[in-house]
Structures are given as structure tokens and as C-alpha cells.
Amino acid sequence: MKNRSNLPLLFSIAVIYLLLNWYVLSGLKVYTDSPLLPLTYWLIIALVILSLVYAVKRIARHGMDAFFKFSTHVFLILISVQFVFIIALLLGDIYRLFTHGLRNLYWVEIASVLALITLFVFIYGIVRGKYAYRIISHKLYFKDLPESFDGFKITQISDIHAGSFNNAKAIQRGIDLIKQQESDLFVFTGDLVNNKASEIVPWISYFSQIKAPYGQFSILGNHDYGDYVRWDSLANKNSNFQDLKRYHAALGYRLLLDEHVEIKKNGEKIILAGVENWGLGFGERGDLNKAFKHVDPKDFKILLSHDPSHWEAEVKKHPLNIQLTLSGHTHGMQFGLEAFGIKWSPVKYRYAHWAGIKQENNRYLNINRGFGFLGFSGRIGIWPEITVISLNKLRPAQQPLSS
């Protein structure tokens, strides 16, 4: 009954998609009247749809393998190119309607050029964009920062998603960029793998190269618990989780599980705490109070929490003054625009603040855009990020609080 109830919706989607393709084809016919055009066009559409359906049907047996990724990416690119072509063509047809003109090659050429640009942007995002690492630096100022930590540098990466990697040279380039920062402290804010602990094994020799004088620390993200894949038994899932924790140690990272450590320098200290994943809709496991148990409220505190919804829901209003929280999770949806003063991504409709620094109640949140990628094997406009944060002592006459 459930499948039957979906039939009207599926039928409606199919009809709409056919009409949209008919509209695209009507534009392309300006170039040629050859009967081969519609035959070739509909054959391509049919092959793409059939491969997508077949890929989805075989997920249970083969998972999201190379064929699934290929099929879904081809469909994503096709529908994106079609969307751009349709919008441009529609604007031309609206103009023609009000000017009583005829559809001509001029408008179709504009639509075609924009569609080709979209195609090349997607190709770049898949081939190069997903490894186009960027260093993003922030200088933050705090009145209560211990004097010894003035100028203390923290490098943060997040969302490695090792199961998605396919280019060792590119990964090494990213690791080298991290090492070049020569920060005092290194932190990783969750999602080491996509689903299974074994995904990180080929990359341990790469990420274990990262060293910092005051240590390397990490937390878990929602993907690290193995919740998104079928297991033969609960015992196997638990075994995978134990393996994952061991791999953090093999990387040289101290995994913080609702706990904190003291970072000491010249007889002064700051508190670094990490919680298990806490995210609205993604498992509320972390225990903030446990992580800061026995911490003096006057201490300077940094929290590692994978999902920024935790900051919104609990951290920013917690009785303890947690001065800085470092998160990831959003990836900036791996698609958007950050240029010419514009900062936009579809993920904003899920997270009002989805990347970079936010300040509220004299507390800061930084959301890293992610080192890796997931789902869409690429990045467009939202590039992989290595964050470098400089902690600075705010002097009485200094402004602003951040830069």
C-alpha cells in the first residue's frame, strides 16, 4: 500500500521531467531540424535515468559503489545543466512574448553558453575543486585569555571522510599545508570516516604526519558511529567503533569523549574539552557537563563539538562561559558562492550560520567547511578548509573582538 501511495507523486515527477526535457529539446531544435537530434537526446536521457534506477536498486547488495557514484553524478550534472539552460531559455521566451519576436539563435546561444559553463564548473568541482585546499585564518581577542597564550595558534580541520578519497598526491598536498602552519595545537572536529573504521587505514600514514608542540586532539562526528550502514550484528558494529577509536590513537590524536585536558604553558593553562556527537537530528550523545566536570568557571575554555547545532542549543547559553567552540559537520554543503561579498549555500536553509566565525554572548563559534567530501564527489564554490585560529589577549583599549 505504501508503494502504491507514492505512485501519483512519482507519476507527477515523471510528467514534469518529460515536459522540461521537451522544452530543452525545443530550444536545441533551433540549431538543426535533423531527426537525429530528438532521437539522440531522448536516448541519452533514457540511458541516464535507467542507470540511476539500476544503481539505486542495487544499493542493498553493492552499497554506494563506483557505479552508483558515477550514475548519480551524471544525473546531478545533467539536471543542473538542464536547469540553467531552461532558466536562460525561459527568460528569452518571456522577452519574446512581450516583444512579439520569434525565438532565434541568439537566446539559445546564451542558454547554451551558460549550460556549458555549468558543465565545466561541475567537472572542475569533481576533478580539482574537492582538493582545492584553502587556509582560512582568524584572529580572535579575549579579555580573559591567560597572558602566556597570547598569540597561541590552533589549526583545525574537520570532516575528513576518508572513505571518499581517491587522490593520494592531493591529500599529501593538504597535509603539507597543515604542517606549514606550524601551529601550537592541532584539533580535528569529527567525521573521520563515512561509515566504517577501515576507511581511514590507507590514510593513517598521511594524517599521522601532523604534529603540534601542545598535541593533537580529536572528537567524533555523526558518521563515526557506523549508524548509516547495515551490520551483520550489533557486535560487529561495536567492534568497528572500537577499531575507530584505536585508529585515532594510531594517528597520534587524543580522542576526547566527554572529557577535557589542560593545556599548560609557562605555569598558566587553558581547558580543551571534547564531546561526543551532539546534533539536532543526528544523535544527541554528548554530555557537556561531564566534559567540563571539575573545571573552574574562571578558566579559559575551548570546546570541540562536531555539530554546530549543539552550540545553538546548549553551548552559547551554558552557565559556564565557554569562550570558543570549534565545529564542522555542514561542509558548506560543498556547493555555494563565497565571493564579491556574497556568502551563500543551500545549507543556510538548515543552518543559519554554516561556516566561519560567529560571536554571541561574548562566545565564539567557528564552523570549519570540512577537509573532505561526502555524497557529491566534488566541491563548487565552497572549498576544503584548513582553519588557523590565533588566540590573542584583548587589551583595555583594543577593538574589535575578532578579525
Image (cartoon, rainbow, N blue to C red):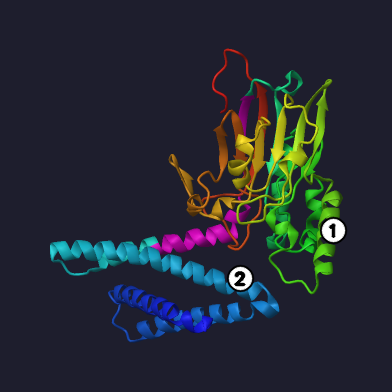
Q: Is mark 2 on a helix, strand or loop?
A: helix
For the point 60% across and 35% down, the residue is 317
279 vs 68, nearest the viewer: 279
Q: Which residue is drawn at 74% across and 63% down?
A: 226
Tell which circle, 1 or 2, labels the residue nearer the N-terminal end. 2
Q: Callout 2, which amino acid?
A: Lys
Q: In this view, does 300 lie above or below 75?
A: above
Q: Which residue in the structure is indicated by mark 2?
A: 69
Counting from the top left corner in percent of width and height, residue 21 is at 37, 76
Q: Nearer the viewer, residue 65 or 270?
A: 270
Residue at (53%, 71%) from the top-left corner? 74
Tell me if I can see residue 44 in this picture.
no
Query: Disc 1 and disc 2: Cα gap in Å?
Result: 29 Å
* Residue range of the region highlighted in magenta in the rendering: 115-141
Instruction: Establish if 167 lies above or below 173.
Output: below
Does the magenta portion include 261?
no
The residue most toward the left is: 100
Q: Nearer the viewer, mark 1 or mark 2?
A: 1
* Image spot of residue 308 (x, y percent): 61, 45
